[in-house]
Image: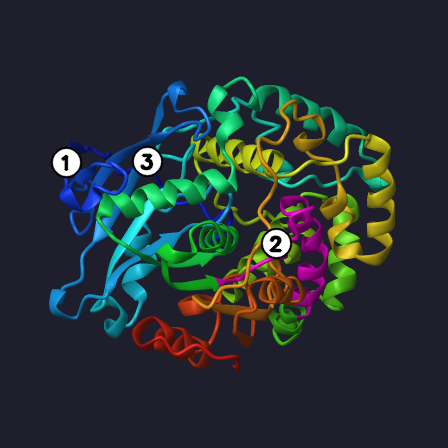
Amino acid sequence: MRRLLCVTALTTVLTGCLSASPAMAETGQTGPGWTACPADPRQECATIQVPMDYQDPAKGHVSLAISRIRTAKPETRRGVLLLIPGGPGNSGLSRPLTHGMRLPREVLDRYDLVGFDPRGVGASTPITCGLSSDDAHLRNFHPWPGPGGDITANVARARRVAEACTRVELARHITTRNEARDIDQIRQALGERKLSYWGVSYGTYVGAVYTTMFPSRTDRAVLDSSDDPDPRRVARGWLNNFAVGVEDRFPDFAAWATARESTYGLGDVRATYLALTETHPDLRAYMFQGLYSDSTFPLLAEYMRALRAGDPLPTIPLPPPDQHQNAVAVLTATGCNDVAWPRSAGHYARAVARDRLTYPLTAGMPQNITACAFWPYRQAEPATRIAPSSKVLMIQNRRDPATPYSAGLKMRDALRAPLVSVDAGGHGAYFANGNACGNDAVTAFLVHGTRADRDC
C-alpha cells in the first residue's frame, strides 16, 4: 500500500551554511546556503533555524530541513510553490520530486518547488515518543476499540502514549500555528515577499491558518482535500469524520471487488468485511488505508480473500519503525496542543457505542479516546478561526475516506473560497486520485490566477 501511512523515506542528509542576504532585512532571518541533496542531486538542500517557542525565543531554536528544485525557465518565474505535507507528521522533504515533478510543464516553468520537513519531523529537529512495538503498531495508529466496543485497552494505551510523548520539551511547541510561523520563516529565508503553496490533507489546514495569520504574504494557495476547520474541535473533529469518509468511499471498493468476483470471491463485500472483522480486527486498519487510492484496492481485496479462505496473507508494506514512531509523536503533539479534548473515559465510551451503530464500518474508532485525553499541557493559544481569503482555490474529491466532502464544505464556508468538486474517490485530488478536469482547473489557477467553482 503505497500510501499506507503517507510517510516518505527520510534518507536525505541535509547540510546548510547560513549567510546574510539583503532581501531578508525585514526580519533578520538569514538565507540558507544550498547544497546538492546527497540522496538525489536533482534537489538542493539546506537548513534554517527557527525559535522553538515563538512566545519565548530564549528557549532556543530548532532546525527546519528544506529542499528546492528551481524552475528551468527563470524568465517566466512567478515565485515559490511551497509543498505543504499532510499528517500531521508526514515528511515533505522529497515532495519537490515525488509530487512536484508530476505537475505540468507550465506550472514548473513558473515556480521554484520547495519542500520541507515540519518541526519535529525527520530531517528537521525530530521527536519520538519511544513507544513499545505494540503501542506503535499500525493496528493501533488509530484507536480501534476492542470486542463489542470495549475501550479499556484504548484508555490504558492513551495514558501510556501521553506520558511517553511529553518527555521532550519540543512536544509542547508542535502546533499548527507554529508550523504556519515556521513557513513564514521559510518565506523570509528564501527572500520572497509572498508565497504560493499547495497543501494536501492536514496541509490544507496549515495553509488556511497561514493565510489567516499572514494574509498579505500569501500569493496563490491550493488547498487539496480539506477537513472541517472548526476551532472548537480541529483534530478531534477530523478523527470523528473518518466515519463519514469511509461510508462515502467503501461503495467504490465494493463495486470494484464485485466486478472481480471470479478473482476474489467476496460475495456481498460489505457483509463479508463486517463478518471478517469479528475474528480479524486488524483488517479494519488495513481497510481504512486501502481506501486512500484505487491502486490499493487489489491488495485489500486479496487480503480479505485470503482471510476468508484461510490462505497465507499477502504482505502489507509497513514504514520503518523509526519513521512510524516519529509520525506518531508529531501527530499526537499537534492534535493535543491545538485544542482541548474531553477528559472523561466515560465520554468516549458512550460516543463509541453510538458511533458503532451509525457507522459500523469503522466500529466506533473515530469517536474513541486518544492520548489527548491525558495531555498535561494547556493550550498556549486558541485554535485559529479561519478567515475568508481571496487567495485560495480548493479542490476536493466527493468520496474521500480521510477528509470527506461534507467536511471540506465547512472549510469552503470558512474561507469563502471557490471549490473544484471532483467526482472521484480517494484521498488527494490534484494529479493524484482526481481527474483531468480538476487538474486543469488547479493548473489554470496556479498559472493564470483563474479562480472559480467547478464541478468535475
Q: Position of residue 441 (x, y in %)?
A: 42, 78
Could you tell me the amino acid type at mark 3? Answer: Leu
Determine the residue positioned at 20% across, 69% down.
109
Q: CA distance from mark 2 to mark 1?
A: 38 Å
Residue matched to label 2: 229
Residue matched to label 1: 20
Q: Quadrant of residue 301?
A: bottom right
- Residue 359 among those drawn in magenta: no
417 displayed left or right of 286: left
Q: Position of residue 70 (x, y in %)?
A: 18, 57
Binning the other alpha carbons within 10 Å of mark 3 as few (below 14), some (14 to 19) or many (20 upward) gives many
Residue matched to label 3: 64
Residue at the extreme front of the image, as rendered: 26
Binning the other alpha carbons within 10 Å of mark 1 as few (below 14), some (14 to 19) or many (20 upward) gives some
In the picture, the disc for residue 261 is none
Viewer-closest of 101 and 202:
202
Could you tell me the amino acid type at mark 2? Answer: Pro
Q: Nearer the viewer, mark 2 or mark 3?
A: 2
Q: Nearer the viewer, mark 2 or mark 1?
A: 1
